[in-house]
Image (cartoon, rainbow, N blue to C red):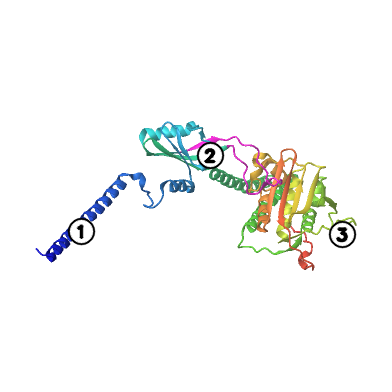
């Protein structure tokens, strides 16, 4: 065998060895990949439900945080394994256990039959007095903290001795339903009362046709009830106008807040005099005359300007002054103050009246809501004045709040942005005229 034959045999042997090595390597890669896939498939915790490349724990945490309900995970005995941040305000967990007997009962039922149980529970809550963050009291639209929580609780089995407790706070919905029921009841009562009285009085007048004194008396009663019904309808129309943003266009101008306050006081002066109530006006704490042009000591900074609809703002302030007069004892004082601070103009009405109980503070701006219905009927109130005031103020970009304590009087504060400086006087700076029949 010559040298060339030896070389050829060596080359062939090397090729065979290389070919065998390549085949073995490929088989090993396939086998390794299959083993890895089998291992991954057998380990369910290595995969996320939302994708192979999604990390499990961070995704779980974010999912729980965006859920509309709070989540608590426990075992069948109520030992807490996890509680989401949203569940903390409900106070259902003490240490590492559930502290609500009602929730534990639902958990026991779900653990017994293996199904999903859902129920609404009421939870008493100890709350302090509503904290006033701005010092002006409770703003219209805010709610006083309730002493009762209404929680929708849903419990189901999610694993080996693990149960998910989903909690949805229904308190605001229950409060809205109560407000709606009260409104329907009140509006029905307010419309039926004068209408029914007119009908009965008309029958009485017919029966007493031969008695002139009785006819005059009952005719006067009919006129009074008719006026009450007319006033109620007018107030409803005013409220509808105030609430309708498409049906009415505000005539926003640069107007004087002091002029608005003066016009509102003049509209109520006759009622105040009849009840011997003194109305005082001040600007930034300094007394000023109620009528423009009176006195020489009027401060130079009285022209506090706002951008608003003059008629709407005068209606709002007029209603506040009217309420202050109606709900104050005779020989007391109603103070109307206009001021400016931090770019905001405020109009404040303070009385020495009967005050408003704490539980009613967040409802006084509701339509037809009245703290004392008997007193309201005596004073001729319709329960719509503050609702109209709220919408008038809010439509002009302002806020209204109330502070009150029973037996100590009330303070209503309107806050509006101050108008930008305008060096040249315009027709919009003129004082508003009295609103007839407002």
Closer-to-camera residue (87/427)? 87
Q: CA distance from mark 2 to mark 1?
A: 68 Å
Vertical position of residue 320 compared to residue 2: above or below? above
Name the side, left or right, on which 110 lies relative to 374: left
Please check the rendered image and state whether residue 121 is part of the magenta-colored stretch, yes or no: yes
Q: What is the number of the mark on residue 329?
A: none
Residue 88 shows which numbered tag? 2
Q: Nearer the viewer, residue 221 or 124?
A: 124
Q: Nearer the viewer, mark 1 or mark 3?
A: 1
Give percent across and percent down for residue 375. Answer: 70, 41
Closer to the eye: label 2 or 1: 1
The span from disc 3 to disc 2 (Cα, nearest Å) is: 60 Å
Secondary structure beneath label 2: helix
Residue 343 position by quadrant? bottom right
Q: Residues within 10 Å of mark 2 (few under 14, many from 20)?
A: few
Q: Which residues are magenta?
A: 119-147
Task: Give the quarter of the figure containing the C terminus.
Answer: bottom right
The answer to which of marks 1 and 3 sits earlier in the sequence is: 1
Residue at the image point whose x is 74% and y is 46% from the top: 411
Q: Residue 32 location in percent, x, y? A: 27, 50
Residue 18: assigned label: 1
Judged from this view, the residue extending furthest toward the right is 296
What residue is disc 3 on?
Answer: 293
Separation of marks 1 and 3 at Cα, in angstroms: 114 Å
Which residue does the image show at 67% across and 58% down from the upper left?
397
Q: Earlier in the sequence, mark 3 or mark 2?
A: 2
Q: Secondary structure at mark 3?
A: loop
- Of 327 and 228, nearer the camera is 327
Q: Is residue 85 visible?
A: yes
Whether residue 437 appears in this view of the structure is: no
Q: Quick one: 415 or 67, which is closer to the camera?
A: 67
Which of the two discs, 2 and 1, labels the residue nearer the N terminus? 1
């Amino acid at each position: 065998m010559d040298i060339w034959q030896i070389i050829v045999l060596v080359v062939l042997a090397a090729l065979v060895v290389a070919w065998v090595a390549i085949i073995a390597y490929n088989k090993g890669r396939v086998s390794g990949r299959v083993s890895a896939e089998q291992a991954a498939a057998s380990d369910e915790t290595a995969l996320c439900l939302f994708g192979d490349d999604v990390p499990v724990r961070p995704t779980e945490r974010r999912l729980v945080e965006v859920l509309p309900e709070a989540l608590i995970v426990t075992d069948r005995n109520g030992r807490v394994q996890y509680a989401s941040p949203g569940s903390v305000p409900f106070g259902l967990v003490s240490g590492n256990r559930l502290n609500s007997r009602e929730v534990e009962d639902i958990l026991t039922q779900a653990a017994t039959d293996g199904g999903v149980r859902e129920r609404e529970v009421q939870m008493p809550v100890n709350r302090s007095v509503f904290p006033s963050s701005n010092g002006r009291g409770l703003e219209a639209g805010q709610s006083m903290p309730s002493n009762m929580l209404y929680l929708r609780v849903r419990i189901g089995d999610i694993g080996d001795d693990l149960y998910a407790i989903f909690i949805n706070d229904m308190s605001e919905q229950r409060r809205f339903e109560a407000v709606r029921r009260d409104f329907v009841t009140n509006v029905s009562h307010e419309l039926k009362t004068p209408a029914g009285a007119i009908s009965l009085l008309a029958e009485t007048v017919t029966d007493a046709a031969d008695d002139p004194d009785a006819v005059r008396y009952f005719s006067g009663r009919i006129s009074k009830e008719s006026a009450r019904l007319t006033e109620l309808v007018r107030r409803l129309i005013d409220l509808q106008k105030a609430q309708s943003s498409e049906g009415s266009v505000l005539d926003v101008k640069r107007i004087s807040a002091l002029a608005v306050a003066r016009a509102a006081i003049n509209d109520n002066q006759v009622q105040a005099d009849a009840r011997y109530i003194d109305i005082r006006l001040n600007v930034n704490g300094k007394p000023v005359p109620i009528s423009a042009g009176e006195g020489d000591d009027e401060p130079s900074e009285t022209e506090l300007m706002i951008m608003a609809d003059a008629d709407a703002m005068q209606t709002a302030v007029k209603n506040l002054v009217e309420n202050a007069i109606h709900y104050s004892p005779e020989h007391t004082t109603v103070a109307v103050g206009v001021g400016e601070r931090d770019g905001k103009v405020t109009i404040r009405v303070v009385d020495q009246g009967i005050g408003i109980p704490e539980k009613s503070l967040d409802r006084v701006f509701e339509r037809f809501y009245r703290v004392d219905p008997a007193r309201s009927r005596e004073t001729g109130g319709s329960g719509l004045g503050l609702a109209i005031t709220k919408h008038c103020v809010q439509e002009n970009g302002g806020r209204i709040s109330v502070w009150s304590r029973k037996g100590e009087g009330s303070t209503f504060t309107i806050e509006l942005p101050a108008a930008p400086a305008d060096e040249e006087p315009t027709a919009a700076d003129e004082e508003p005229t009295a609103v007839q029949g407002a």
